[in-house]
Image (spheres, rainbow, N blue to C red):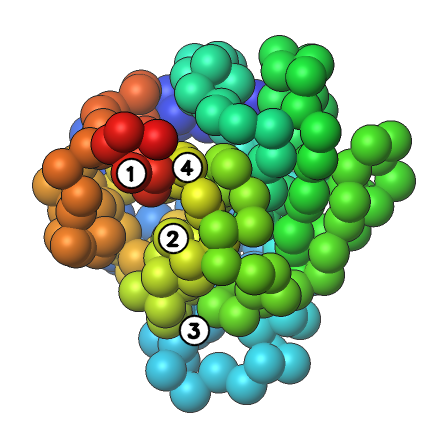
Amino acid sequence: MNRETTNRIRFVIEDVLPPILRDSALFRQAASLVWGKHITKLAKFRERAPFLTAGEYEDLYREHPRVHAGTDNSQACIDRIVASIAGKSVCDVGCGTGALLSHIKAGNPDLKRLTGVDFVVEDAANLDGVEYVAAMIESLPFADGEFDTVVCTHVIEHVLEYRQAIAELRRIARRRLIIVVPREREYRYSFNPHFNFFPYTHSFLRAVHPVPARHVCVDIGRDIFYMEDRSEPDA
C-alpha cells in the first residue's frame, strides 16, 4: 500500500468519524478485524509511554506490521525532499528500508556521502553507496555539522524525547534540515505507535521552537514538510 492510499483512509477515520466513535470500543473491535490484538497493544503502548523500557520499545517496533511498500513518504513529499537537498553529504535519520535514500541518490547524482540511520530496520545496510549506522535519534554518533543536509521523515511522532531528537538533528546538520511528520489528531485507538500528534503546521512549529527565520513549514497532503537553513546567511 502506498502513502497516498493510506492518506485517503486516514482522512475518513481521523476527520470524518466523530471522536466519540473514534475512541469507542466499537472502533477498537472493527480495527481488530484488520490487526487483531495489536490494536489494543498499540493503545497500551502509548498509555505506558513514560514507563517503557528500551526493550519494550524495540520489541514493539520489530513486531509492528509494515503498512507502506518501501517508504512512508508520499510521492509529493519525496519530490520536495529530493529537490531541497543542499551540499554533498546527506544523512537520513530513521531511514527504514532506505527507499528515500535511493530517491535522493537518483535525484542528486553528485552527492559524495549518503548515510542512513535506524535502530530496528536494517535494510539500508544492503544498499550500494549507503553508509548504514545503527543508532537512536536521541544520541547520534556524529560530529557537529557533519552533514550538509539532514533528513528525518516520519520519526519525530514516534519519539518520546522529541525535543532532544530535534536538537540532535540540528546539531549534525551544517546547511539544511528537513523534517516530515504526519498531520494527524490523537485518538485512543490507531494503527500507528505514535506518541506525538501535529494536527496543524503551527502545532509542529511549537515542537521545533525556537524556529529560525529561514524556514519553511507547509502542508503536503496529510503530511507536514518542515525545512530550515542552518548555514550562515552569507555562506
Q: Is residue 53 left or right of residue 181?
A: right
Instruction: Read off the residue under disc 3.
Output: 44
The amino acid at mark 4 is: Arg
Whichever of callouts 2 and 3 sits on the residue coming sooner in the sequence is: 3
Q: Tell me if I can see residue 225 in this picture.
A: yes
Label 2–label 3 contact, CB within 8 A: no
The amino acid at mark 3 is: Lys
> Which of 196/31 is in front?
196
Residue 163: x and y in percent read 31, 65
Label 2–label 4 contact, CB within 8 A: no
**Callout 1 crowding tier (Cα within 10 Å): few <14, some 14–19, many ≥20:** few
Label 3–label 1 contact, CB within 8 A: no
Q: Secondary structure at mark 2?
A: helix
Instruction: Read off the residue under disc 2.
Output: 170
In terms of image quadrants, where is residue 67? Answer: top right
> Which of 65/57 is in front?
57
Q: Secondary structure at mark 1?
A: loop
Q: Nearer the viewer, mark 4 or mark 1?
A: 1
Whichever of callouts 3 and 4 sits on the residue coming sooner in the sequence is: 3
The image's mark for residue 232 is: 1
Label 2 and label 3: CA atoms lie apart by 32 Å
Whichever of callouts 4 and 1 sits on the residue coming sooner in the sequence is: 4
Q: Secondary structure at mark 3?
A: helix
